[in-house]
Amino acid sequence: MSADLAIVGAGPAGMAAAVEAAKHGLSVVVLDDQPEPGGQIYRAIERAGPRLRTILGGEYAAGEALVRDFRAAGIDYRPDSAVWRLDAGARIAYSRNGTASTLTADRVLIATGAMERPVPIPGADRPGVMGAGAAQVLLKASGLVPAGRVVLAGAGPLLLLVGCQLLDAGADVAAVLETTAGGDYLDAAPALPRALAGWRDLAKGVAMKRRLKRAGVVFRSGVGGLAATGDSVRFDGGEIACDLLLLHEGVVPQTHLSRQAGLAHRWQTEQRHWAPVVDAAGRTAEETLIVAGDAAGIAGARAAALSGRIAARTAAGKEPAELAAALARERAMRPLLDRLFPPRTALPDDEAPVCRCESITAGDIRRAVRDGAMGPNQLKAFSRAGMGPCQGRMCGLAAAEIVADERGLPVEEVGSFRIRPPVKPLTLGELASMEGEAAEAEAL
Amino acid sequence: MFRRLPEREASITIEVDGAPVPAAPGDSVAAAMLAAGIAAFRHAPVDGGPRGPWCAMGVCFECLVEIDGEPNRQACMTTVREGLRVARRPAGARPKP
């Protein structure tokens, strides 16, 4: 089958783009790997009861209107669909309920959103150590609340937000350990002029920090030497017992699909991640491929929805001027937030597991570079880093940074893992079940 | 390791290594297992160490289990249904070649 616009991802960018495109008369197909629309930010919003809504707050509940519009727009929405190949000819291969299919479209919008930046500290691969965002996903989707003592460690606004939400859900939050000095900026916040772009975010950060401190949560800034032991978290000058350690160092774009499709990516020095090269309407060097939302660069849910609408309207041949102005206002808040919560600059310790799939540490990667690995792709041959089932999603950023650091080169110059299809694991059974216009010979 | 808010009632049952595990409609297999106190989902094929979910959203592949006889399924990306059967891979079952 063929559509005017195929969208990969049903988070704020994908949903808003779908609604906007349908409004302009385009036929739209949306493929998403989750069972429900909303993405991670509005995960399971349709099922959230009153208690969860109170805990998760207004920014979560705000997603409900968008999900409702999306459901009502008569869009060909295919949940539980894992896209494993995208070609510039705007052909998509995906698996759904154990069956692989292809579809073509005039244009494909990549709206794959963000993922938490992996936090490679020693012991991070033990059970009982998770992303703070993962704990939030479990809370949203299943109402799960950590049962024992929780410590949150790392950096970024989500660390504080999840800390507060877990407190409200009745969890025993023992400590928040910030790896940056971000907390110090928050202390100074009330003195800053209210006219400053992003003041609202700043005030929110201050309020969250106060709430945690008032609840008796131990708060430390500038914490170094984090390591998970299994029943505690160690750091330079201390150790705190905990049953669950939640790590967080911000979110980064999910670029596997945009990379596999052959799009150019640029290293964002300040945020320390890759992002596809796009123009203001999400257009890329490939006429058929568009990227919107956090997949094109982290700007949050409101900006993601706006960028999705802009991309859809542009695809429909319409002028998105007033949306572009709204997006510019939304993005103006970002620089301050980025500066308040910079990702920590220290690279992982030698003992830290970087490639979890293949059990490769930062030290292993440094040795491989000294043995002659010039970049991430040679690193694969030297160490197997990036060759496990996650296909380098967990180690790609840190591996590139370590190689660059060892070689004394900018990350841009050493590059990233080459990403090949299938970008999601595919069984032979699924491949054999291939439906649609592509022959199985074309699949790989 | 996790408990459940009362508004998400566990009304169905899945099976993990032969034992019944309660689950709520809409749960991922990973959420149901974590709510039942299961922290280790598999053993890493290379170092043999116990592993559990890191991301809960399909990125990390640390929650791979056998589901209804099919190996290496992502527990966080599979929605529970009555009678679904999970088997964890025993330690050292698949050594690195």
Image (tube, grey):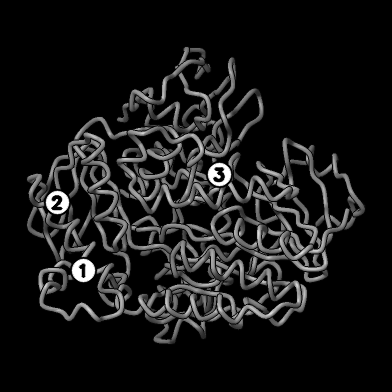
Q: CA distance from mark 1 to mark 2?
A: 19 Å
Q: Which of the two discs, 1 and 2, sits closer to the camera? A: 2
Identify which residue is drawn at 51% across, 16% down. Answer: B12
From the image, which quarter does the C terminus of chain A lie in? bottom right
Residue A161 image position (x, y, % from top left):
28, 53
- The type of residue carrying mark 3 is Lys
Residue A84 image position (x, y, % from top left):
70, 54
The chain under label 3 reads B
The chain under label 1 reads A
Q: For numbered disc 3, what is the local secondary structure?
A: loop
Residue, disc 3 = B96
Tell me, yes or no, whether the two marked residues, 3 and 1, touch with CB atoms within 8 Å. Answer: no
Q: Which of the two discs, 3 and 1, sits closer to the camera? A: 1
Quadrant of residue A392 in the image?
bottom right
Tell me, yes or no, whether the two marked residues, 2 and 3, touch with CB atoms within 8 Å. Answer: no
Position of A380 with respect to A45 (left or right) is right
Residue A370 in sight in this render = no
Residue, disc 1 = A180
Quadrant of residue A399 in the image?
bottom left
The chain under label 2 reads A
Position of B73 with respect to A125 (left or right) is right
Depth order, front residue of A407/A185 = A185
- The type of residue carrying mark 1 is Thr
Q: Is residue B52 above or below residue A403?
A: above
Q: Is residue A386 above or below residue A346?
A: above
Q: For numbered disc 2, what is the local secondary structure?
A: helix
Residue B46 image position (x, y, % from top left):
48, 45
Q: Earlier in the sequence, mark 1 or mark 2?
A: 1
Badge 2 crowding class, 10 Å Cα cut-off, few under 14, some 14 to 19, many 20 or more, is some
- The type of residue carrying mark 2 is Arg
Q: CA distance from mark 2 to mark 3?
A: 48 Å
Residue, disc 2 = A211
